[in-house]
Image (cartoon, rainbow, N blue to C red):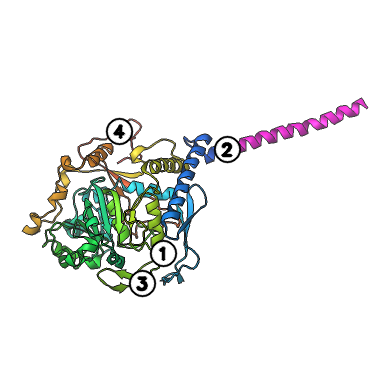
Amino acid sequence: MRQHKQVSALNRQPSVLYLVCAAALFSLLLFYIQSSLFAGSLSLARKSEIIGILSNFQSSVQQCVDKRGLGLTAHIIDHCNLILKYPEGTNSSWYNAQFKHFEPLEYKYDVCEAILLWEQYRNMTTVLTREYLDSRPGGWMDYAPQRIAQLGTKKCTNKTLCEENLNVLLPAKPPFHPRQFRTCAVVGNSGDLLKTTFGKEIDSHDAVIRDNEAPVNEEYAKYVGLKRDFRLVVRGAARNMVPILKGSDTEVLIIKSLTHREINAVIKTIPNPVYLFQGIVLRRGAKGTGMKSIELALSMCDIIDIYGFTVDPGYTEWTRYFSKPRKGHNPLQGRAYYQLLECLGVIRIHSPMRSKRREDWSDIPHREMIRQAHAAALHLKRNEDGHGGDLGQFGNCKVWGNVDPENSGPVSGSPDMSDVRKYSNYSKWEVMPFESLRREAQDHYNQMQGVSLYKMDGNSRSVAPISTTSEKMESICIIPPIQVKKKNQGGSYYYNDQKIPRAL
């Protein structure tokens, strides 16, 4: 009997050892999974804190949409994702011929990605420059031809071929700076502007940005104002730049897409500065020139007020304040995205359907909450990407460039420019003394240590497709010519004692 018990005990010992080993293996597996999920500098406690910050921000965005959305409601999925929904019965009258369906009544957004994208725009330039093409891999041979219509080739066989077509509107470096203006008005073309008298309010802004051929004259002054600082145009409107710019030789014209020889010939005869736009492609955001105008404004302005956009319900046709209605593009999608941007603190919407003429902005998340949400989203994103350390203000820099001070002039233009062009208003922007910038712009320049940030790509043919829920931003960062980069024995490069991600 005693022998039987001893045998049973011996038989149980392997089972116990097996359970102990299995438990140990399970613990190791769990530790490995947690280490994989939370690699980098984020502990579980820090991860929980970050998710809490983002969840609180999502709740504020939800409340903002519900109060200001004129029927739109926000439905939270998690700490980053939400869905904006139109009420049942909304008339989806715009038919998408490409995908053969009417506009949907709900749109999913990744708020974490959106806040990273738009806060980054506050630090960037959106004008194509010579230093960008010099620094971008394949900038002159591959990218530059994409900005020139009727070139006859997909690639420039030599730099001179592209220079001949771009010189006339290519500044050496950014002519405009982040934080350059405190307030900016972006004026769209909606017929709803005729239901208001926003003119004086629009003109009170430090800078006004208009779109395409929208007229500015006494007939419409009380509706849209008379101030003219910047105008973003598509290529078709750029062909008519002389009548569009009539009455102002200082209004800056920025072409949204491409240039070509006809446009270049006209540019040489006018005193107005003319540039090419360079910015991200928002495939799931709002469409049209108005969206690009907001991108342009955010790269120069602290506060952006938009007027004359299709942000109110009930649109059955695409109206304009100065002409008959025309075919438009995705008003429901656009209105939802504009409302999201307002509740992210990017823009402030003005329209005749808002209940209070003097808007109360208290239900929009305040700047400190937005700053905390941006920092939390940034930590979360870098942790997911495996970046444990803090890369500071240069975290999105994927390519670094260094400007050659001997290979750039102060003012854009071609060797055969006319006298009108030589003595034009370009120098107002391109040779602006640093001391003349507002203090906030100077502080930003010093904080960025003089580095210029650009979107890596600015043309739909060279940008990777963007999903429904996210937009991505990768930057080219260009070091000013007076700085010297240092290389240590390990082969890493440093800029002002800060290690940069990639060697120049």
The one of 70 and 310 positioned closer to us in this rendering: 70
Relative height, residue 341 to residue 6 (above, below): below
The one of 18 and 245 positioned closer to us in this rendering: 245
**Residue that sits furthest to the left in the current view:** 419
Labels 1, 2: front one: 1
Real-space Cα separation, disc 4 to disc 2, in angstroms? 36 Å
**Residue 140 locus on image (x, y percent):** 25, 54
Which amino acid is tagged 1?
Leu
- Residue labelled with disc 1: 332
Is residue 443 toward the left or the right of residue 413 in the image?
Answer: right
Q: Residue at x 40, y 53 (%)?
A: 471
**Residue 247 locus on image (x, y percent):** 13, 63
Real-space Cα separation, disc 2 to disc 3, in angstroms? 57 Å
- Residue labelled with disc 3: 317
Is residue 335 toward the left or the right of residue 82 in the image?
Answer: left
**Which callout, 4 or 2, points at the residue further toward the start of the chain?**
2
**Residue 221 locus on image (x, y percent):** 20, 63
**Which callout, 4 or 3, points at the residue further toward the start of the chain?**
3
On the question of residue 93 being in view, the answer is yes
Q: Which residues are magenta?
A: 1-30
**Which callout, 2 or 3, points at the residue further toward the start of the chain?**
2
The 10 Å Cα crowd at callout 2, few under 14, some 14 to 19, many 20 or more, is few
- Secondary element under disc 1, as helix, strand or loop, is helix
Relative height, residue 242 to residue 81 (above, below): below
**Residue 248 locus on image (x, y percent):** 13, 60
Labels 4, 3: front one: 3
Which amino acid is tagged 2?
Tyr
Real-space Cα separation, disc 4 to disc 3, in angstroms? 60 Å
- Residue labelled with disc 4: 487
Labels 2, 3: front one: 3
Q: Which mark is residue 32?
A: 2
